[in-house]
Image (cartoon, grey):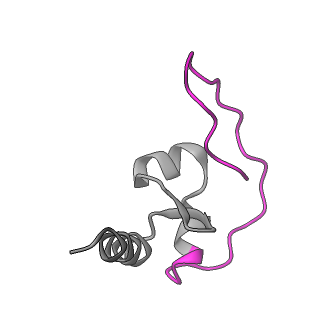
Amino acid sequence: MTREEAYAHIGKLAEEHALILQAFGGVMTIVHPDTQREYGVEEKCLYMAGQGPWPEEKQPESKPIQPGQQELFVA
């Protein structure tokens, strides 16, 4: 399997299981379901995978960033 085939396979699995938060230009942000719930993005991931209704608009909760941790989630 080539790297390109591996990327396509991972992307397909992530899409089928509603793990993608955002994707653009060959970059995917794949988020664990527990983390999706923690950050309030589960509905968005499910919707984008065709597994849920349009998510309700709500203000995301502000989570403190731990030292060395980058904020990965864009609302």
| Residue 68 relative to residue 64: left or right | left
Tell me if 72 is positioned left or right of 59 in this view: left
Residue at 59% from the left image edge and 76% from the top image edge: 47
Locate the N terminus and report the quarter of the image it occupies: bottom left
Q: In the figure, is residue 66 to the left or right of 34?
A: right
Q: Main secondary structure of the magenta part?
A: loop
* Residue sticking out furthest to the left: 1
- Residue positioned most to the bottom: 50
Give the magenta-colored segment's residue range: 47-75
As drawn, the residue found furthest toward the top would be 67
Q: Position of residue 15 (x, y in %)?
A: 44, 75
On screen, 72 above or below 62? below
- Report the residue that reaches farthest toward the front: 2
* Residue 38 inside the magenta-drawn segment: no
Q: Is residue 61 magenta?
A: yes
The image quarter in which residue 69 lies: top right
Residue plotted at (42% across, 55% down): 33
Residue 9 versus residue 39 in the image, above or below: below
Residue 71, percent across and down?
64, 36
What is the x, y in percent for residue 32? 41, 52
At 79% across and 48% down in the image, what residue appears? 59
> In front here: 72 or 54?
72
In the picture provided, is 21 more to the left or to the right than 58?
left
Q: Which one is nearer the viewer's eye here, 75 or 4? A: 4
